[in-house]
Amino acid sequence: MRTELEKIVGPAAVDERPVRDMWPVAIMAEREGKAPPKVLVARPAGRDQVAAVLRWAGANNVAVSPMGGGSGVCGALSPAAGEIVLDMSAFDRVAEIDETNLVCSCEAGVNGYALEEQLNARGLTLGHYPSSLPGTTIGGLIATRSSGQESSRYGSIEDMVIGLSVVLADGTFAAPRPGPRSAVGPALHQLFVGGEGGLGVVLGAVLRVHRLPEWTVGRGYAFPGLGAGLESMRAVMQSGIRPLVMRLYDPEDTVFNGYDLKSGECLLVAATAGGREIAEAEAAAVKKLAAEARGLGEEPWQRWLSHRFDLSAERMKAFLEPPGSYLDTVELAASWTVLPELYSRVRSAIGVGGLALCHFSHAYQQGCCAYFSFAGSSGTEAEARAAYGRAWEGAMSAALELGATISHHHGVGQARARWVADEMGGWMRVWRAVKEGLDPGGIMNPRAVGGPR
């Protein structure tokens, strides 16, 4: 197998090593001495090499997983022995930044943070700020259907993607279609946004970008309880304001993040942006809609801004080093009327073993994301895995029973594979039909969106 891959991409572009993402289950297994298997990793240098590898894999019935930055947390990147990985890091070129039409064309291996820096230098922004941004690639953000901290203003990754260039499982190339929008059939490139490498390989993207706002006003508010904070968030979103950032922390997460508020109070960090007059007027409107809250000034916003990338997957790995420990995050989304009960039920499910935190962000007029963190420790690895599993089971069951989504922006992978069909219902048949049509040999990532068909 290695010899054949070397013939395609060259001997220097093939190596053998363990590969995995940052899924806590994989980290816990490695802690027990169960290291991931070594697999062949090919680093193609162009479209033709990607197509040739996929054609070879199809002819030899070998599974292929595309790899970006490896910062995912759901086990979508977890190749088994005998499979191969396509390392897309050589696709690292920003082809064009069009400041007139506000479009950026770049390859899939471009680092998310590096792209943002290039855009910022020109007074532009993609507006996509997941906490893992420094470790991401554009292809990985697309594959997981990512959302960032400024999504309430700029949208999530699917709103930024105008077009994609991809190589299908049989080596066929599909290029981006022209224009900012087209009514010539469905936007089929969106099938790859959240596809976790299960349909083919994303080579590059055409993305909408934005001018950096002239002015930003950020403030903190202390609410007497979670219900009041959620009502304020709803009022802001339904007033027509599109805040740059709006994050509400439950009392425990408020304390965990070091904010010294009164017992039971919840912190809301909110920022508005745009022209100075607009940003300040919207900030005044947010303040008015937060009438039940105590104003905390700019310090909470400045503090949040300086720590926005602290909760990375690498930090999660460090928390999981002690034997018997477990830690994970579960990001759900629901309508405003469902959120209070979802919060109560999920927090009860994940909090049995120790730490249970939640903040609310990624707000829409219809609802928002509830981002839970939980952690604990047990006397044995088996007990830790069992407690961890019960937390996930409770969270997923509550979400499905209440009509919430089981993932807002982390994707599916192995973490949610059991519950995907429950949420998708009849659309699961559509997904499997698409996969059958584009990947009849089943060579593309077997752990994508619910696993093998």
Image (cartoon, rainbow, N blue to C red):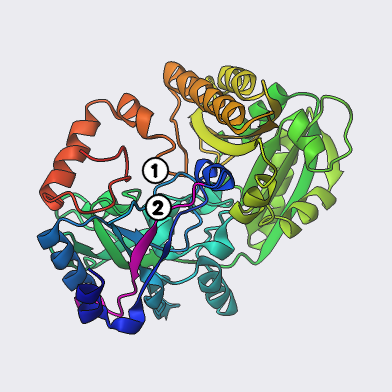
Q: Is residue 407 above or below residue 56?
A: above
Circle number at residue 184: none
Camera-side residue of 189 and 239: 189
Mark 2 vs 1: CB contact within 8 A? yes
The residue at which mark 1 appears reads as: 413
Image quadrant assignment for residue 326: top right
Amino acid type at mark 2: Leu
The residue at which mark 2 appears reads as: 77
The question of residue 82 being in magenta is answered with no
The question of residue 43 being in magenta is answered with yes
Q: Is residue 242 above or below residue 237?
A: below
Camera-side residue of 320 and 94: 320
Q: Is residue 96 above or below residue 102?
A: below
Q: Position of residue 57 (x, y in %)?
A: 18, 62
- Magenta span: 34-48
Q: Is residue 357 visible?
A: no
How many neighbours does mark 2 have within 10 angstroms: few (below 14), some (14-19), or many (20 or more)?
Answer: many
How far is mark 2 from mark 1, CA to CA?
8 Å
